[in-house]
Image: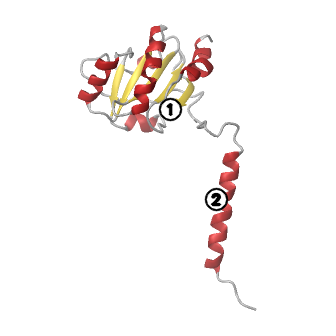
Amino acid sequence: MAKIKPLYLLPPAIFIGLATMMFIGLQRENPNELPSQMIGRSAPKLTVEPLADLPLLTADNLNADGIKIVNFWASWCAPCRVEHPNILQLADLGIPVHGVNYKDKPGQALQFLESLKNPYTKIGADQGRTGLDWGLYGVPETFVIDGNGTVLLRHAGPVTQKVMADDILPLLSQ
């Protein structure tokens, strides 16, 4: 009887492991939804720099009374342009919307805001540290924060009318 070499068992073991992970992933209620460890926790620290002379986003802004929104965006991000009218609409509703300009050139970020209008109450520029601390998958990404600085919602991807109606606006009435 031939002896089986251990290396021959490696490919089937890898296949079984990957198949198990895919099966578990497919069992999630909404496979498009990315889980977030942030919900229910305090908003992470901010490591942002000023963007020109615009009002700087600080940790105190995140702990201020009332619901507020933190939106990570960049001028080079096409989905950020798509969501921008909805971010403006949220700001027009009187909701403090704070912006974090992510890995962008200051001149291009300012040009973006000048051409599309600036919806942000406070803003900061991030070269990557804040994005890592917040668990950012990419831009755009939006967080809803309560008056205690606790993350109520994390939405990866552009804010659409449906996301506003189904996810963000119901939190504002709490």
The quarter of the picture where the C terminus appears is: top right
The quarter of the picture where the N terminus appears is: bottom right
Q: CA distance from mark 1 to mark 2?
A: 27 Å
Task: Please provide percent x and percent y for residue 66.
Answer: 52, 11
Name the kind of residue labelled 2 in the image.
Answer: Leu
Q: Nearer the viewer, mark 1 or mark 2?
A: 1
Q: Is residue 160 above or below residue 102?
A: above
Q: Nearer the viewer, residue 152 or 74?
A: 74
Q: Say few, some or many: other residues with alpha carbon within 10 Å of mark 2 (under 14 / 14 to 19 / 20 or more).
A: few
**Left or right position of 144 against 108:** right
- Residue 18, by quadrant, is bottom right
- Residue 118, by quadrant, is top left
* Residue 50 in view here: no
Task: Please provide percent x and percent y for residue 16.
Answer: 68, 63
Counting the numbered discs, the total is 2
Tell me which label, 1 or 2, sits earlier in the chain. 2
Residue with the most extreme right position: 1
Q: Which residue is mark 1?
A: 157
Name the kind of residue labelled 1 in the image.
Answer: Gly
- Residue 155, by quadrant, is top right
* Residue 28 in view here: yes
- What's the coloring here? secondary structure
Q: Nearer the viewer, residue 149 or 92?
A: 92
Mark 1 vs 2: CB contact within 8 A: no
Q: Nearer the viewer, residue 71 or 145?
A: 71
Residue at 53% across, 23% down = 160
Local SS, label 1: loop
Residue 18 - label? 2
Q: Is residue 104 above or below residue 57?
A: below
Local SS, label 2: helix
Residue at 67% across, 58% down = 19
